[in-house]
Amino acid sequence: MDEDVRQTLRTAAGALLEHHLTRLTDDLVDRVRQADEVYCAYVSYEDHWSSTREGVRQGLAAILQEPSERRDLVFTAAMAQRRAEQGLPLDSLLRMYRIAGQVTWTAMVEYTEREFPDRLGVLVRAAGHVWHAIDRQCMVTCDTYSRREQEILGRSKERIDALLDALLDGTADAGVVRTAAASLDLPERGRYAVVTVRFAGYRHQDDVRLPGSLGGARLLWRMRAGHEVAVAALGEVTLDELCQELSLIVSGVGGVSPVVGGLTELGGAHELATLAMRTCLDGGPELARLDARIPAVLVITQPDLAGHLVAGTLGPLLALDAADRDLLLTTLETWMACDGSAARAARRLFCHRNTIINRVRRIEQLTGRSLARPRDIVDIALALEAVRRLPETT
């Protein structure tokens, strides 16, 4: 910028700063509030007017300062941080700076045209410098706003995670439950379930897109070591409907708790969902509902007793050579899955019905148990669960 241009620009800025600051402030505030209802919603008139006056003052003063000083940028950064904390959208803040540039430049042109018309052409050459200054303010605004917004979102997420942890760990007292309900926008009493999921090839939660809702149920996810946990606010959604939707996204294994009646019961529901997931036999995909896996849960939670049950019930069968043992265990498991129907089991195993009947009789002879006696069936079923889920018992 040559000296002639610099002096013309400074003359206009100095006059506006000394005699027209209030008028410029009024004009800018009115135009912004007329053009942007969002600004009005987030920033009070008093706050807007006082901050605008100081911003205009700093901007005009910057023209009188050396370029290296630019004290207006310090104010710009502070204002961007404040507006981020108030929740004002960045678009509204940047729109304000564009209007500020228009108002300020128009005022400088009008002043020069009125007081020094012969220098109007010189002032026009300064237009690029004025808008460059506005661009610098916008750049500082974007950078500061974004950093502050991330800090706020980070603290907010940390708070949400802490509240979810308290609910899922069962450590939330009445006050924390009320706070969680308000902060998470959840009713204290309502239909809830807890879901635990370990995705196939799990590395980090960023590798998987976790849905915020499924089939009308709202899901709030929390990362744990090696798996994810979700509080499912069911509303009118049934557990069957939730599980059907979950089965479409669970690539690994998952567990689903029974429905509970409020936030205070989520700790127990979390334990049950975790137990359900532990009953999954391999890497999946498999989704286990606690209410359908109670025998398996009983077995895995009492491994010592399960070992005694296996030894006392299936011991002679397990002592056979591997091929014979596996054949009989597969037959027993299939026969029980077919509700004791030899014909259905035979179709599944591609053999004759009489073959199934003979194998079942041999199992009864080896174990000394009758598969027609309810008590013996319970013992054998639980022992079979233990063999499948606790290999160390065999």
Image: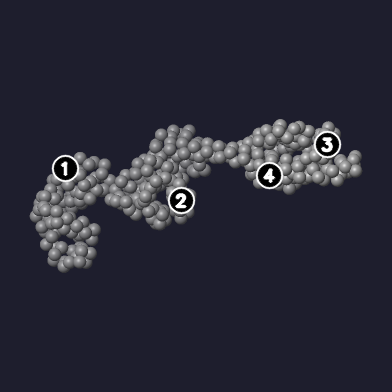
Which type of secondary structure does the marked residue at label 2 adopt?
A: loop
Q: Residues within 10 Å of mark 2 (few under 14, many from 20)?
A: few
Tell me which label, 4 or 2, sits earlier in the chain: 4
- When asked about the image quadrant of residue 44, the answer is top right
Foreground mark, 1 or 2? 2
For this orientation, the residue located farthest to the front is: 2
Tell me which label, 1 or 4, sits earlier in the chain: 4
Q: Is residue 42 above or below residue 367?
A: above
Residue 107 % position (x, y): 83, 42
**Amino acid at the residue labelled 2:** Arg
Horizontally, residue 293 falls left or right of residue 91, namely left
Residue 94 has which mark? 4
Mark-to-mark CA distance, 2 and 3: 58 Å
The residue identified by callout 3 is 7
**Amino acid at the residue labelled 3:** Gln
Tell me which label, 3 or 1, sits earlier in the chain: 3
**Contact check, label 1 and label 2, Cβ < 8 Å:** no
Residue 308 has which mark? 1
Which type of secondary structure does the marked residue at label 3 adopt?
A: helix
Tell me which label, 1 or 2, sits earlier in the chain: 2
Q: Nearer the viewer, residue 276 or 350?
A: 350
Q: Residues within 10 Å of mark 1 (few under 14, many from 20)?
A: few
Foreground mark, 4 or 2? 4
Which type of secondary structure does the marked residue at label 4 adopt?
A: helix
**Contact check, label 4 and label 2, Cβ < 8 Å:** no
Horizontally, residue 6 falls left or right of residue 201, namely right
Mark-to-mark CA distance, 1 and 2: 44 Å
Q: In percent of the image, x 56 and y 40: which residue is there?
A: 150
Residue 209 has which mark? 2
